[in-house]
Amino acid sequence: VVTDEEKKKEFLGRIQRECNGMERLVSDLLILSRMQNPDYQLEMEVLNVIAVAQDAMRGIRILMAEKQMQGSVDFEDACSLIKGDYDRIRQVFTILLQNAVKYGEKGTEIHVYIKRQEHTIIAEVTDHGSVIPEEEWDQVFEKFYRVEQSRSTNTGGTGLGLAIAKNIVDMHGGTIGVTSDLNGTVFTVKLKVDFDINRENFGSLEDHHEAI
């Protein structure tokens, strides 16, 4: 029996953190399960990727303030329109920005840059923290994958965020990738301007993965 009050608080705090982690894990698993259901439908509308990124950035201001970090969203073309599901695209940016806060060094900047190349909108999310080894760039999008060393230590994540982000981008007919070196870690999302979910007709997400 633990009688020391400080020890009690420590154990209760540990239990609370474990419960919160389990809750996040179950929530993320449910999200993945729903998206992989053949009946899952995106709520498509015309949206401005810049506005979505700015919305997601506002949502993590408190997290950034805790690490004395700054965030910015810059762009080439103020009219960066695509057809997509606003909530899901916002979720992609939120996942990438939360990762940037988790793994970026205290006092650094998180930078989102949005540009257009022909019929594609490209969004780059950059943080300045520990480097992801090149041999792990593709693996970070796998379920439960954790990058070794400092980018996976005591972050409280579920290991599903990037897998969810990739699924969402896939469902929009886009791509997501990462590069990382001493100048920063950059997650790049590419989305089609003229994406038509009916024309693409992916069927289930698993079918789409097999077709790639």
Image: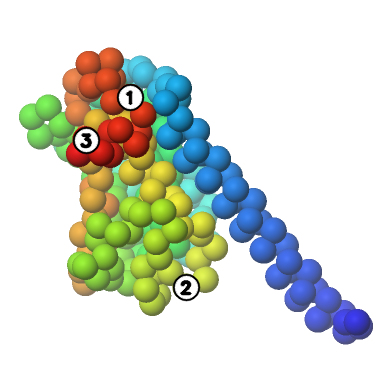
From what the image shows, is residue 110 above or below residue 210? below
Q: Quadrant of the N terminus?
A: bottom right
Name the image quarter holding residue 190: top left
Secondary structure found at label 1: loop
Q: Are marks 1 and 3 in contact (CB under 8 Å)?
A: no
Q: Position of residue 165 (x, y in %)?
A: 37, 43
Name the image quarter holding residue 11: bottom right
Distance, label 1 to label 3, CA atoms, is 11 Å
> Residue at image x 19%, y 20%?
194
Q: Which mark is residue 211?
A: 3
- Mark 2 and mark 3 lie on one chain; the one further toward the N terminus is 2
Q: Where does label 2 land, which residue?
A: 153
From what the image shows, is residue 19 above or below residue 171? below
Closer to the eye: label 2 or 3: 3
Which residue occupies the foreground of this view, 54 or 168? 168
Q: Which mark is residue 203?
A: 1
Name the image quarter holding residue 74: top left
Left or right, 175 with reference to 33: left
Taking the view exactly as shown, the residue that stands out farthest to the bottom is 4
Q: Which mark is residue 90?
A: none
- Mark 1 and mark 2 lie on one chain; the one further toward the N terminus is 2
Left or right, 47 with reference to 152: left
